[in-house]
Image (cartoon, rainbow, N blue to C red):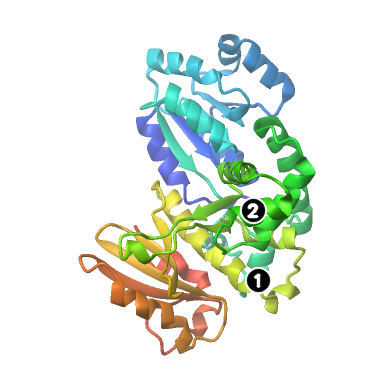
Amino acid sequence: MYINRMLEKDILEGARYFPVVAILGPRQSGKTTLAKKIFDTHTYVSLEDIDKRTAAIADPRTFLQLHSNQFGLIIDEFQYAPDLLSYIQTTVDEQKRQGFFILTGSQNFLMNQSISQSLAGRVSLHTLLPLCSKELADAGLLPEELEPILFQGLYPAIYTKKTPPERLYSQYVRTYIERDVRQLSHVGDLSTFQIFLTMCAERVGQRVNMSEFARECRISDQTVRRWLSILEASYVIFLLGPYEKTLSKRLIKSAKLYFYDPGLVCYLLKLNQMDLTTDARRGSIFESFVITEIIKEFYNNGREPSVYFWQDKAKHEVDCIVDLGKRVIAIEVKSGRTVNTSFFTGLSRWKEVAPQNNTTETYVVYGGNKKQVTGYKNVVSWQSITDEIHMM
């Protein structure tokens, strides 16, 4: 079974204008499947294969000649042989064929550095995250209730191959730590890194406290920063910064930590689906899910996310601020199924301090379904976030 991806249109558009298309994103997000579907006449080669990787590193010119065909070449997990970029640059400058090289990678920290040096102006960059709720809805696979999607997460194999979440995330964490972290990041103490990853899950939706991480893991502040960068670069977490265009001197400065996938958080915290109905962390996991849905909307339309949070020293807070230039959208996230007036407290304060030269819109995204939205303006179900909040 294949689930249509919203990013497909933007990738095809990029292939019209650039000789190289790079599809980046976490492991298991569907990059290979999407690349093969769109560019089905290209030759495919994966550098996960040790022999292929060795050949690409040892003799890049011969590697490219052997595997390319008249239509083009897909190179999967390209970060394992970044020196190929120099040889790809020479080829594209000579041939000037759009959409010829398709590169996929799950390690952004190597890919972007190499691309900026070798393929500036020659590459169309795209980010493919796990499925969004709209893609599941279009495929008729979106759950009726909130708990299943938080517990299962949104990695394609859970829906296309019916892979049990526990099995998928167990293999994901093992592969990520034992392969990616060890080979690409030179982390010496893998067991401590796994503890650090679980600590991140425990702090989803909270502001990052470097000293606390360092103290509890018995590592330095510098190591904390480096490990957070590794998790960011491999699309496991993202750090949401504060919105600073209004009352900047009073704003909380530290970033908040979120995960790109709620199922991974549940796995790391050993939460089952039933736990999510009562666990105190439900609200933070749901908040992470909603903000990630908004970020996916940007990426799926070929745009960089412009998403923040807002909080002042008096603890007035709005979970998500979307800055669209002349439009600013403030979104409060509440996991409850019953809407009440307390949902709007942060938004009321935001309206008092919002930039006057912008059009400000406010919404509450909550944990109920579409049928339960009655009597309140601008209340949106988690099932229809991007349908009802227009960000493009």
Residue assigned mark 2: 155
Q: CA distance from mark 1 to mark 2?
A: 21 Å
Residue 147, compared with residue 52, is above or below; it is below
Instruction: Name the outermost residue toward the left.
Output: 357
Q: Residue at x 30, y 72 (%)?
A: 353
Residue 296, compared with residue 233, is above or below; it is below
Residue 266, compared with residue 373, is above or below; it is above
Does the CB distance between marks 1 and 2 fall below 8 Å?
A: no
Tell me the quarter of the picture where residue 204 sits. Answer: bottom right
Question: Label 2 neighbourhood size at 10 Å, few (<14), some (14-19), many (20+)?
Answer: many
Tell me the quarter of the picture where residue 277 sits. Answer: bottom right
- Comparing 240 with 48, the one in front is 240
**Could you tell me which secondary element the residue under label 1 belongs to?**
loop
What amino acid does circle 2 point to? Tyr
**Could you tell me which secondary element the residue under label 2 belongs to?**
loop
- Comparing 180 with 43, the one in front is 180
Residue assigned mark 1: 281
Which quadrant: the C terminus?
A: bottom left
What amino acid does circle 1 point to? Arg
Q: Residue at x 76, y 46 (%)?
A: 192
Q: Is residue 76 visible?
A: no
Q: Residue 126 has which mark? A: none
Residue 287, position as x, y percentages in the image:
54, 67
* Front tag of 1 and 2: 1
Q: Is residue 325 left or right of residue 80?
A: left
* Mark closer to the chain start, 1 or 2: 2
Residue 16, position as x, y percentages in the image:
37, 33
Q: Residue at x 69, y 57 (%)?
A: 199
Q: Is residue 118 left or right of residue 274?
A: left
Q: Is residue 319 left or right of residue 144?
A: left
